[in-house]
Amino acid sequence: MNDLYDILDTICISDEDGFMARIIRVEGSAYKKEGAMAFFQDNGSQVGLISGGCLEEDLAVRIQNGIQEQSCTISYDMRGIDSLTWGEGSGCNGVIDVLVERIEQDQKRYLQRLKSYLDKGKSVTYLKKLREGDVSNDYLYVAEDHDHFGEWIGEIPKNIQHLGDGIHACKDLGYDVYVQHMHPKQRLIIFGAGIDARPLVSFATATGFHVTVADWRPALCTKEKFPNAAEVVIGFPAELLARIQLTENDFVVILTHNFEKDKELLATLMHKKVRYLGVLGSKQRTRRLLGGKPIPENITSPIGLSIQAEGPQEIAISVVAELIQISKRRDIKKACIS
């Protein structure tokens, strides 16, 4: 999903038209799954990936040779082992359907509107109408506040928020629809601006998190020391907790290395409803922060996947891996639209 933000940034600053390619169906294994996107600009540049590079090369050639349709589906069968098939050396073993759409000024205006919603922290669902043996030009964006925009003729399918990414059958309407839920960048708030926070910020940002660093020490908590952070916030724990408005989708990590500051932060944060609350250090230290009480289920300590990590870099990798693992868990029900 991280490619989506790069694509939208490119579309908003460039006058180039182009073709959007997105995976809409995967049968078997593939390098990327439904929702992966890449944008091929008319000037030959490319943003995003839908594979390890092999499909992009083919799509670039097809686009250069001239795709006539405004939208079409291209199917890649990666299951073969013959050197003349896509299976040779691809690392995949499935069938991948790629939707290719021409992106010009009208569509770009809708994509800019999509970006504005995501920047405001609001999710948007994309719908593409698919007819048997054909791809319709109808598409629609539906924001979580039910505002919708795009080019769509006819009734809008119901219950789209309860469907997973992929193709679903609209039984009553007589066609299939591709559904893709697009979410804002997930927020990671890091309390603590020590040296070990720097690789954590860098790796988390690179994997698509919107990272905030918060600390009471102005000499440590600076944009110069954290150039990849979306924002840095300076203040003592009570001030930080008042200024940073947390949501149930946020990830929070405490690593100030100051026992009293950690204790003060945890005393408040443990009662907040967030997606993840982690405390750097051993279980024994965290129990001490809690006054000897057992660690509640909503607190993760120690943080990070168990990879015997040592040093700031390895610990940061283990923590980001854990955050990615949690962020991939979806409770969206996969079902048919009725």
Image (cartoon, rainbow, N blue to C red):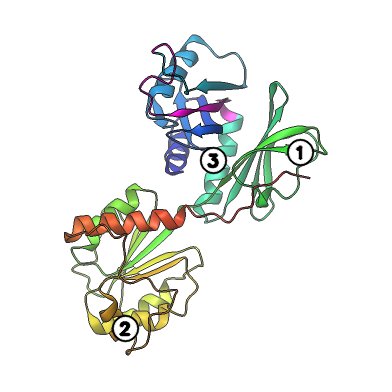
Q: Secondary structure at mark 3?
A: helix
Q: Is residue 204 above or below residue 148?
A: below
Q: Secondary structure at mark 1?
A: strand
Look at the image and say whether residue 99 sits in the magenta stretch.
yes
In space, the residues marked 1 and 2 are separated at their CA atoms by: 52 Å
The amino acid beneath tag 3 is Gln
Name the foreground residue: 59 vs 299. 299
* The disc label shown at residue 112, or none: 3
Verify CB contact (< 8 Å) between mark 3 and mark 1.
Answer: no
In space, the residues marked 3 and 2 are separated at their CA atoms by: 48 Å
Sequence-wise, the earlier of marks 1 and 2 is 1
The amino acid beneath tag 1 is Cys
Sequence-wise, the earlier of marks 3 and 1 is 3
The residue to which callout 1 is attached is 170
* Residue 223: image location, x then y, percent: 25, 58
Look at the image and say whether residue 133 sits in the magenta stretch.
no
Magenta extent: 83-105
Residue 224 visible, this angle: no
From the image, state whether disc 1 or disc 2 is nearer to you.
Answer: 2
Q: Secondary structure at mark 2?
A: helix
* Residue 252: image location, x then y, percent: 38, 67
* The disc label shown at residue 287, or none: 2
